[in-house]
Image: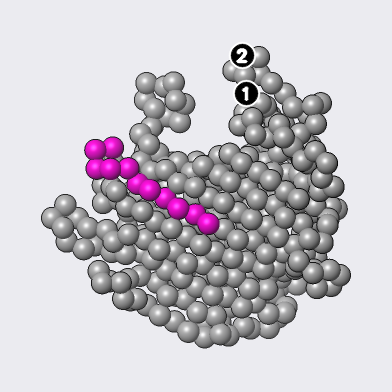
Amino acid sequence: MKKLAILLTVIIVVTVTTLGFTACGGGSEFREPLVPQAPWGIADNIFEQSDFRVHVYGPGSLNPDSETHAPLLARGALTQTLEGVGSGIHNRITVQTEFSMDWESEVENPSINAGAHDEISSSVTFMRTGMRPVASSRVATTTNRYDASGTFLHNNSYEFNVQYVAENQVARGSSIRVGKDANGAWLNDARNVAVRSGTLFCNEQLFFLLRAFNNINPGGRSVNIPTNNMVENYIRHDNRPISLNAEATATGRLAVDDFILEFMDEENAYMDDESGNVMVDSMMVTLALNETPAGPIHRFWISNGVTFSREGSLVTTSRLILRYEYQVFDIYGRLQYQIVYTLIGYDSW
């Protein structure tokens, strides 16, 4: 079964499922317009931080009031910080991402993941104009997995460094290491890896690409993005680009933690009288392989038509990702995991 690889990484059972994508390739024919004003502001030295709670559930309903509510298998956290540096033609954006996951004990999670701790740290730098990436890196550190008898199964740690170049050139000097043995020695180590060039994007930019493409809006059209995942391509020895389809498919109001009131004008803040939740106008953006079959659909809830700014600050931001969820299936098509990211903190200046 084909699977869609999206931002960051949740480490699960047999393989490392990469939740980020590297969009490399497509060359000069890829010309997707960006929103007129960057959602994270126009100041040269902008700073933005988003904090997400990450939960991994097993099969079942995600409605907490349901009798068939899915069991919670892991709890994690994701923090992304965006910082603008430089000015003029040298104006760049750097995004740092920190991710950690703690799997429940064997009582709640009777699997090889029980009690494991996994971490990811990544960085990407890209040009503000056009969002062309300059360099990126990622280090995923996972706990050894053992079977019930104590036999070592695998350690899916990996790391890579990528140096991007100008259009229609090939970058060498990038590197990737994948998998460790029981003693922590790398099993695969590749240097001077060629990176597909052209109009390209990097996996660590995903949240920001969905916010920045102008046609990802309730009145827009679907956006096809040529992608290339470095880890998966290395494992399968195939660097042909994969096309992703992103589209805003629905609108509505989403319940958000009340921290968001610090950044909203009163006329944009809706309180649900029954639940007491803060409700934010949002659009649901779906992301899937542009193929048949398309595989699992990834869903992002992004604020729509609402601006956010701390009182007294000149920085105004918009199109925040409020929630992101997707499902993971085994090779037989059976649901294994449901991963949910929820925005629980935000700041900008």
Give above or below for 141 relative to 271: below
Other residues around mark 2 within 10 Å, as few (<14) / some (14–19) / many (≥20) = few
Q: Provide the secondary structure element on which disc 2 rests.
A: loop
* Residue 322 lies in the magenta-colored region: no
Is residue 293 visible in this depiction of the protein? Answer: no
Task: Name the spot of residue 168 as percent of width and height, x first.
Answer: 70, 80
- The residue under the point 46% across, 70% down is 159
Left or right: residue 80 versus residue 166 is left
Which contiguous range is marked in magenta? 98-108
Task: Name the spot of residue 341 as percent of width and height, x first.
Answer: 53, 43
- The residue under the point 40% across, 63% down is 141
Give me the disc on residue 274: 2
- For the residue pair 293 and 90, the one nearer the viewer reads as 90
Gap between marks 1 and 2, in whole Å? 8 Å
Q: Provide the secondary structure element on which disc 1 rests.
A: loop
- The residue under the point 22% across, 58% down is 146
What is the three-letter code of the residue carrying label 1? Asn
- The residue under the point 26% across, 51% down is 112
Find disc 1 in the rendering and name its residue.
277
Q: Is the image coloured rainbow, by chain, by secondary structure, or in one colour?
A: one colour
Task: Name the spot of residue 125 as percent of width and height, x first.
Answer: 67, 68
Q: Quadrant of residue 179?
A: bottom left
What is the three-letter code of the residue carrying label 2? Glu
Task: Name the spot of residue 286 as percent of width and height, x first.
Answer: 61, 44
Q: Quadrant of the N terminus?
A: bottom left
Other residues around mark 1 within 10 Å, as few (<14) / some (14–19) / many (≥20) = some
Q: Quadrant of residue 301?
A: top right
